[in-house]
Image (cartoon, grey):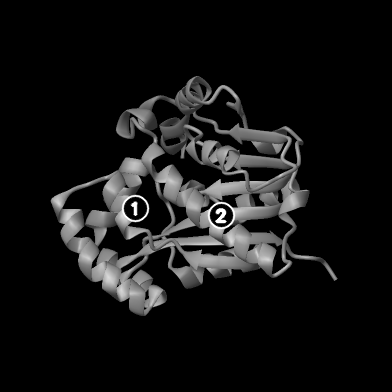
Amino acid sequence: MEKLAQLYTSSEYTEKNPDYHAKDSPFKWRNFQKCLRDAGKRNKISLTEITSVCEIGCGAGGILNCLKNSGLFSSLARIEGWDINPSAIEIAKAKYSNIDFFCEDVFSSGRQYNLMICADVFEHVENPFHFLRNLHNTAEYFLFNIPLEANLLSMLQGSKIIRSSYESVGHLHFYSASTAELTLEVTGYEILAKRFAGDRTGNLFAYPSLRKAIATVPQFFLESISPYLSSVLMGDHLVVLARRRQRP
């Protein structure tokens, strides 16, 4: 897997994705925020007790910047982003000097946080089960954004869409909502809140195209009837707030 590792540690990934998905950050954060607020209302998490937040695989830092400006956490004292891609960290440091960014492996740092953000990460990892179990040691609560690429539309397109996802962004694993939830469950996570991202219009405005505009119409109506069915047929992202499962 040396070639795959070099995709992130060299400038290759940034060359393929020059904005480092920065336009995705606002609507990803909006969905994270909805999960946090929902769990807070049900007393599954105390937002006032969150003092430290980290994002693993933070990229160019857009999600953390949205978090910092949201005012959601009244006691927040520490925000950090970690990524093994030096190009991404250079961009993040230049754009958001008021957030601490590190071009290192957070697992070897020994640092711990109240909340860990893991947005579009473990589908890139050779062994996601090992990765997710190691992630336990970094925080108490976890936010996941998981692309649901195992859907009917992608299966009908066959290797075209799967190969494209691998070659452009390095995805190795392809999830449905059910397999994503099962993966979290068997690696020791308790799901506190979840939702489908469902932000078709936000994604369209971020990356406008005629083809995407045409596809958005049936997706929007199907989503309004059944978000789960929409994800099965046309994909989506699953947004999850979880915590380490308590051992008996």
Read off the residue under disc 1.
202
Q: Position of residue 180 (x, y in %)?
A: 51, 65
Q: Is residue 174 left or right of residue 141?
A: left
Q: Amino acid at mark 1?
A: Gly
Dot 1 or dot 2: first in sequence order is 2
Q: Residue furthest right?
A: 248
Q: What residue is at 68 percent from the left and 46 percent from the top? A: 73
Q: Quadrant of the C terminus?
A: bottom right
Q: Amino acid at mark 2?
A: Gln
Q: What residue is at 66 percent from the left and 35 percent from the top? A: 79
Query: Which of the 4 image quarters holds residue 227?
Result: bottom left
Do the numbered discs 1 and 2 sit on residues whose CB atoms are within 8 Å? Answer: no
Q: What residue is at 57 percent from the left and 65 percent from the top? A: 183
- Residue 33 is marked as 2
Asked whether residue 46 appears in the rendered view, the answer is: yes
**Position above or below: 31 against 62:** below
